[in-house]
Amino acid sequence: MRVLKKLLVFSGVAATLPALWYTLMAGQAAPTRPFADAFTPHEEFQFDPPKPGSYTLNRFRTAPDGQVLDVNGNTHSLAALTRGKINLVSFVYLMCGDENGCPIAMSTLFEIHDASEKLPRLREDVQLITISFDPARDTVEAINSFSYPLQIDANADQKLKWHVLTSSGMADLQPILDGFGQVIDRSNDQEVINHLLRMYLIDREGVVRNVYGLGTIDPRLLITDVETLLLEESRP
């Protein structure tokens, strides 16, 4: 045995083995961390999201089409905007004062938008879409002012694309709301719009794959569902 050790030492094998081991280990890709790890857990969500790809998302229905306006007043087909991307779609109105409504939706989207800078794999595949259900007050000028911080963000090209949209009026908007199942109800004075908080996950083919409400609008869950869709696409 001592002779064998000497032969290994003098032949240089003993010195080579550790280096070879570290080389082989370095060549192995490190385990990919879930996208949800980029987010800090919120105390109001007393659960952890499941492992990405460990479940299958249902196909609920095809998302509706309709005419929408962007921050520059250009008209778009909603279906054309969503096809080819994975989308997180929310409906809000800028005057909303319900702390359990639009502010939560917008805060969630801003959190995802900011975190996406640390998730470069998302940028080519995922986008955010916010649609106003108050076109009378949320005019093109109003949504342009609201989205101004997004427009001047120096790191915008390193984050998810975010479309902030309105419409020319209820005639264009109502079929979109009906198609998504987003119910709204104006108060008698027309100032307050009662609604249930909803956010929708739409796949590249325009199919609604999940619907989130007040108890499930956890950024970690939303982004885990997005990652699950990406894994679904990668399977043969």
Image: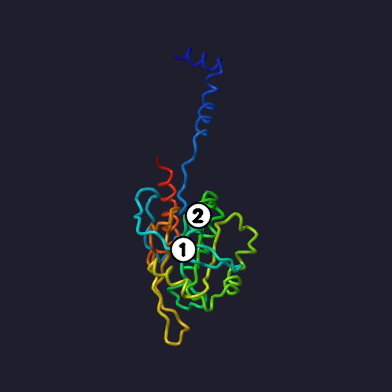
Q: Residue most toward the top?
A: 3
Q: Secondary structure at mark 1?
A: strand
Residue 229, relative to residue 21: is it above or below?
A: below
Location of mark 1 (residue):
89
Name which quarter of the figure residue 99 lies in.
bottom left
The local crowd at label 2, few if under 14, some if 14 to 19, many if 20 or more residues have their Cα within 10 Å, is: many
Q: Earlier in the sequence, mark 2 or mark 1?
A: 1
The amino acid type of the residue labelled 1 equals: Val
Residue plotted at (57% across, 56% down): 159
Q: Quadrant of residue 57?
A: bottom left
Residue 121 in the image: state x and y as whole percent: 52, 49
Q: Label 2 amino acid?
A: Val
- Disc 2 element: strand
Q: How many angstroms separate mark 2 from mark 1 (CA)?
A: 11 Å
Q: Nearer the viewer, residue 133 or 29?
A: 133
Q: Which residue is mark 2?
A: 126
Say which quadrant the C terminus sits in: top left
